[in-house]
Image: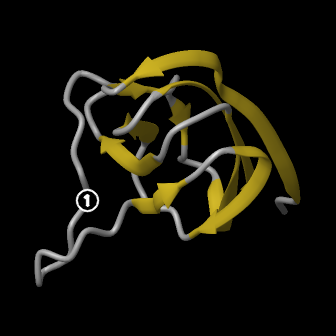
């Protein structure tokens, strides 16, 4: 019989993003169940954060879409400066995930912490 526990993982720690896209560390989603949340801290600008998926050990990364080509991995489309905000999202099932973080207006420092329920 399995039990459920929270997994709290820092995937991006004070990474400077200057009007570009950067990627978080990866995390194995094989034991994740239900919703997850990302705790976001940023010092300036406006961020778009999306979940990306990999099924081949992190060699190839994909933006998930449904059959109607609707983007499924969007965590937040326009996050402004914050000292900390939780964004709850429904993760797209994949063996590995990471987050794509795009800053469009100014240089900023970004930290992302993933909080997910896992079966152990």
The colour scheme of the drawn protein is secondary structure
105 sits left or right of 43 in the view: left
Residue appearing at x 88%, y 60% in the figure: 3
Task: Indicate the quadrant where residue 111 lies.
Answer: top right
Figure label count: 1
Above or below 42: residue 74:
below
Q: Residue at x 23, y 21 (%)?
A: 59
Q: Quadrant of residue 114?
A: top right
Residue 54 location (% of width, % of height): 30, 39
Q: Residue furthest left?
A: 68
Q: Is residue 119 visible?
A: no
Q: Can you give x and y, in whole percent of width and height, for residue 52 in the image? A: 35, 45
29, 12: nearer the viewer:
12
Q: Is residue 88 visible?
A: yes
Q: Position of residue 43 (x, y in %)?
A: 67, 31
Q: Is residue 15 above or below residue 84?
A: above
- Callout 1 crowding tier (Cα within 10 Å): few <14, some 14–19, many ≥20: some
Which of 40/105 is in front? 105
Furthest residue toward bottom: 68
Query: Which of the image's four quarters has the N terminus?
Result: bottom right
Q: Is residue 19 left or right of residue 101?
A: left
Q: Which residue corresponds to the image point at 20% horizontal and 76% vertical from the top-left? A: 70
Which residue has dot 1 on it?
A: 64
* Helix, strand or loop for disc 1: loop
Q: Residue at x 45, y 21 (%)?
A: 17
Taking the image as shown, residue 105 lies to the left or right of residue 27, namely left
Q: Quadrant of residue 113?
A: top right
Give percent across and percent down for residue 119.
Answer: 75, 55
């Amino acid at each position: 019989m399995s039990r459920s526990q929270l997994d709290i993982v820092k995937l991006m720690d004070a990474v400077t993003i200057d009007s570009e896209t950067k990627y978080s560390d990866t995390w194995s989603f094989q034991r994740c169940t239900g919703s997850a949340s990302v705790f976001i801290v940023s010092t300036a600008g406006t961020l778009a954060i999306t979940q990306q998926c990999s099924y081949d050990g992190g060699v190839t990364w994909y933006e998930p879409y449904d059959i109607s080509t609707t983007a499924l991995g969007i965590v937040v489309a326009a996050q402004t400066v914050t000292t900390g905000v939780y964004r709850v999202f429904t993760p797209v099932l994949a063996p590995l995930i990471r987050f794509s973080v795009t800053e469009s207006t100014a240089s900023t420092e970004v930290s992302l912490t993933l909080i997910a329920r896992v079966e152990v």
